[in-house]
Image (spheres, grey):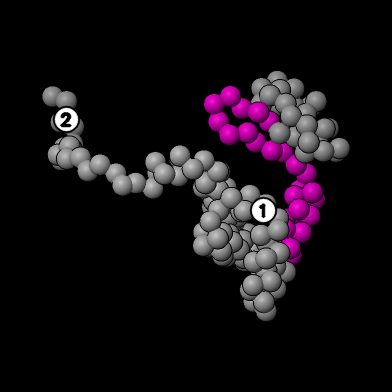
Amino acid sequence: MKSLPFSELIRKQTSVFPLLAESDVTLERRDAENVVLMRDERYQAMDGALRIAARSLALVAKANRQMAEEVFAEELPWLTWLPAEHRAEAVRELLDDLVAGADTGFYLPFQRNLIAWKHTAQIYTDPALVRDLSGPFERTNHGEIGRPKAAE
């Protein structure tokens, strides 16, 4: 994959599009998410392969949920940082999201949940942080926060 500033596409379209014959191109934007350009043939191949893999895992999960969870967990070594009861919960949630993504072609919930669980696992590597985030927490009464008054 090649990376170029987004402005390169605007200034020199004719030099960017030929790059797609060899690889995908990431257009880096300053104040927004990057954009990936790829040929439709490569996109369709990637999307088709991902759907087949996710559906295959879904079929395995239907036949033997425990085995599917074990196989899935092998791909996420950071799961070992989670306590056992949370590890099983994370694998179940992530596998369910992946199966739903395979059915719909919408994988963002899976990706968001994967990131959230990975960050949770990282927190568990710091006992002081776990203790601080586990409470108990001081109760404070700041009163009700009202809506701002409209400007006159």
Give the percent coordinates (x, y) of residue 70: 67, 65
Q: Looking at this rendering, what residue extends furthest in the bottom direction?
A: 63
In this rendering, is residue 95 above or below 110?
below
Amino acid on which the number 1 mark rests in the picture: Leu
In this rendering, is residue 65 above or below 10?
below
Q: Which sits in the foreground, 102 or 88?
A: 88
Disc 1 on helix, strand or loop?
loop
The span shown in magenta is: 27-55
Residue at horizontal 72 percent and vertical 38 percent from the top = 37
Question: In the rendered image, which quarter is residue 71 located in?
Answer: bottom right
* Callout 2 crowding tier (Cα within 10 Å): few <14, some 14–19, many ≥20: few
Disc 2 on helix, strand or loop?
loop
* Callout 1 crowding tier (Cα within 10 Å): few <14, some 14–19, many ≥20: few
Mark carried by residue 76: 1
Q: Is residue 86 visible?
A: yes
Q: Is residue 9 rendered to the left or right of residue 81?
A: right
Residue at horizontal 75 percent and vertical 42 percent from the top = 38
First in sequence, mark 1 or 2: give its number: 1
Read off the residue under disc 2: 150
Q: Is residue 119 visible?
A: no
Residue at horizontal 78 percent and vertical 36 percent from the top = 1
Q: Is residue 93 magenta?
A: no
Cα gap from disc 1 to disc 2, whole angstroms: 51 Å
Residue at horizontal 59 percent and vertical 50 percent from the top = 81
Front of the two marks 1 and 2: 1
